[in-house]
């Protein structure tokens, strides 16, 4: 079994080998291309179920497998989280209207490797507050990624994100976090999007994980609806999220889920 090569740190974090980066690169690329391509469909009048149908078809067309269909009973190829939905929005009969902002989150499996990424989209023109929220959330993710290098800690990542978000008088969601991934969807550690510099596990070359901050215009608290998936802001304020899958290199990190067309931010 080649998925039990290598070692695991005292915090339970798997250290992958150089050759494993190629697998993550391909899984991440396919997830990113699908998010690039779904962007053309996002407009007022479209149902979130139609976006999910497209994604399901594209996953198969790329020879990948959806990681979310069948995951803990989830039935869809994406999560689509509109406006005050923080994450895990279920695609369905919801019709987008002008001014809606939405996160689309896709995870694919390619040759056993998981590529997990999400971005924000807009249905037509959006207001300035929504625009700012999206900018700050993207910038928060990028600040977190800049903190990824051997010797830094997971606390440094969270601290970088929290500092940027709170300087912009927005809040970081505490109830959901990033995660290790690789040959599995969700593995240690929990990657918090807030925290103290120098806290938590030390980053080592060969760690693979996501960073996926959720940022609210209002308060950070969330609740999960009766469908047991949809997480919303308690105060109904707008929420945004961006997610990349990354691998720690000798000098920093490789982003596996970069958009080949450079469309990650506001496609
Ligand atoms: N892709 C999500 C993440 O970033 C997980 C979705 S699980 C699902 O970890 F079942 F809701 F799809
Ligand atoms: Co994730
Ligand atoms: Co995701």
Image (cartoon, rainbow, N blue to C red):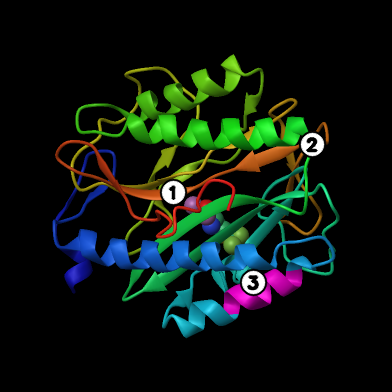
Segment tinted magenta in the rendering = 49-56
* Residue 174, visible in the rendered structure: no
Q: Which residue is mark 2?
A: 127
Q: Toward which corner of the image does residue 73 lie, by quadrant?
A: bottom right
- Which of the labelled discs sits on residue 234, or is there none? none
Task: Sort mark 2 into few (<14), some (14-19) or many (20+) by Cα contacts within 10 Å.
Answer: few
* Residue 3, visible in the rendered structure: yes
| Mark-to-mark CA distance, 1 and 3 | 20 Å
Q: Toward which corner of the image does residue 200 lie, by quadrant?
A: top left
Across and down, in percent, residue 135 comes to: 59, 34
Across and down, in percent, residue 39 comes to: 62, 62
Under 8 Å from ligand 3: the CB of mark 2? no
Q: Is residue 37 above or below residue 221?
A: below
Which mark's residue is nearer the viewer, 1 or 2?
A: 2
Q: Quadrant of the N terminus?
A: bottom left
Q: Residue at x 47, y 36 (%)?
A: 141
Q: Residue at x 58, y 82 (%)?
A: 57
Q: Which residue is mark 1?
A: 244
Under 8 Å from ligand 1: the CB of mark 3? yes
């Amino acid at each position: 079994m080649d998925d039990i090569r290598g070692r695991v740190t005292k915090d339970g974090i798997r250290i992958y080998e150089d050759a494993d980066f190629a697998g993550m690169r391909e899984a991440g690329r396919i997830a990113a291309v699908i998010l690039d391509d779904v962007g053309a469909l996002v407009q007022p009048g479209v149902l979130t179920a139609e976006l999910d149908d497209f994604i399901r078809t594209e996953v198969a067309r790329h020879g990948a497998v959806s990681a979310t269909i069948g995951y803990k009973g989830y039935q869809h190829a994406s999560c689509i989280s509109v406006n005050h939905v923080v994450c895990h929005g279920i695609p369905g009969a919801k019709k987008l209207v002008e001014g809606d902002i939405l996160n689309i989150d896709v995870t694919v499996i390619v040759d056993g490797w998981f590529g997990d990424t999400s971005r924000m989209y807009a249905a037509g023109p959006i207001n300035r507050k929504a625009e700012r929220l999206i900018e700050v959330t993207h910038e928060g993710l990028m600040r977190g990624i800049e903190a990824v290098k051997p010797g830094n800690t997971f606390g440094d990542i969270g601290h970088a994100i929290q500092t940027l978000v709170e300087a912009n008088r927005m809040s970081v969601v505490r109830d959901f976090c990033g995660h290790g991934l690789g040959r599995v969807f969700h593995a240690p550690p929990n990657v918090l999007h807030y925290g103290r510099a120098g806290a938590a596990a030390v980053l080592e070359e060969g760690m693979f994980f996501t960073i996926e901050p959720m940022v609210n215009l209002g308060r950070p608290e969330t609740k999960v609806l009766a469908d047991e998936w949809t997480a919303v802001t308690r105060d109904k304020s707008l929420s945004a999220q961006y997610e990349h899958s990354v691998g720690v290199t000798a000098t920093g990190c490789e982003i596996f889920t970069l958009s080949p067309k450079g469309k990650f931010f506001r496609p």
